[in-house]
Image: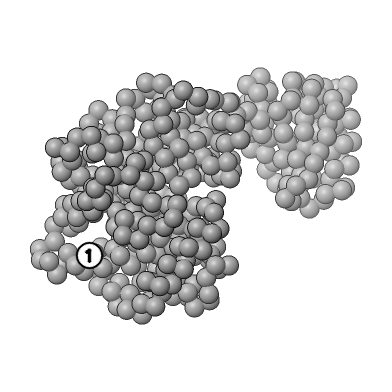
Amino acid sequence: MGTIYECSDKILTIFLNGRIDSNSSAELDSKITEALEKFPNEDVILNAEKLEYISSAGLRVLLKLQKKKEQKLKIINTSLEIYDILDVTGFINMFDVQKRIREVSVDGCKLIGQGASSKVYRINDDTIVKIFDKKIGFDRVKSEQEHAKAAFVNGIPTAIAFDIVKCGECFGTMYELIDASPLPVFLRDNPDKAPEYRKKYALLMKELHQLKMPESFQDVISLYETWIHKLEYLLTDEEVKGLLELISLIPKRDTFVHCDFHVGNIMMQNDELVLVDMADIGKGNPVIDIGTAYFHYKLLADHPVTKFTIKVVFGFMPDDISFSYDLWDDLVTYYFNPATQEDRDKINMIASVIGNIRYIVLCAKHSQLDEDLKKEIIEGARTRFFPHIEEYKDVLKDMDKYF
């Protein structure tokens, strides 16, 4: 059987190998006992990648282990055959069972989009795959898949996520997205139709911001607070306090928020706009999405940092920066229909404050970014943002009129 174990990062992994039946279950039980004596306080994961068969005697050993740990244990990398055994015996309901992740290759596949932490490839006419940075772990990928399914069920036009895969060292998510292409590419290649589709984008955002989300959806203000606290090693106590105070001024809402609602996260499918990248969706005030749009279309264009530019948003560097500015101007026009220039200016100012906060928390949202780049972003904020915190508090007090 060759059952072995290892402990890393407070996780005790027990490897289930070969055949576990009445002849080998006692050995498995003995090695599990040995592992628990050495590492009594660690969480346990059972890795079934090399498990060929398990009988009722082996299953009883796993039940005994779960009772000792007094928690629902995770069994990972099960083959279809092992999964079927666990399903028939009811173990699927008693344990957190995860099937073996299949390998895919993107060699020769067309790159159709990319972001700060992932790249999207078209596998075939029906399927795309989003490959994450190798620093992005399985739990985060699984969370995004679950968010995408929840969004689809709640009426958000999004791609159907149906499988988690591996590509080399990286995890990925498979999506059903038939004959779709990125909206930024369409806007670039069809300038005569660009105004019409910029309007469609703005009206889609406005429509989705009317949707009330279930209680189970995360509160995006809490998410921002978490990101801010993660940056305590880069920020001063006063800077953290200022950011949290600004965020606390945002009125509560229970409507849909994407948290990254820019055109780089929109695909065109049969003339329909389909929203992707559901990693951080939740419920809250739409000013979060408006501010995020300002960050992408204005701040990244006006204050580019060394490595993170609007090229990451669009998948290409526009020949003319007006490509980015027009997206922002039309978003304000069609989302808000501002009656006066004063209204437009106030909307721009509010969006600028939230957009700058989004710029700063980028360092936590994309924790895999280079530390030098994070420091560059923070130093930029110390020049143009943090000195004006008190002024920005007054700006956000006018939000109720527009959001």
Q: Residues within 10 Å of mark 1 (few under 14, many from 20)?
A: many
User: How many numbered marks have been drawn onto this rendered protein structure?
Assistant: 1
Which element carries disc 1, helix, strand or loop?
helix
Across and down, in percent, residue 91 comes to 67, 31
Q: Type of residue at label 1?
A: Ile
Whether residue 144 is visible here, answered yes or no, is yes
Q: Is residue 226 above or below residue 313?
A: below
Q: Is residue 77 left or right of residue 66?
A: left
Residue name at image x 36 percent, y 77 percent = 388
Residue name at image x 50 percent, y 58 percent = 373
Residue name at image x 89 percent, y 36 percent = 30
Across and down, in percent, residue 274 comes to 31, 37
Q: Is residue 338 left or right of residue 373?
A: left
For this rendering, which residue is in front, 130 or 400?
A: 130
What residue is disc 1 on?
347
Residue sticking out furthest to the bottom: 390
Quadrant the C terminus occupies:
bottom left
Q: Is residue 225 left or right of residue 273?
A: right
Across and down, in percent, residue 87 comes to 63, 26
Hey, which quadrant is residue 159 in on the image? top left
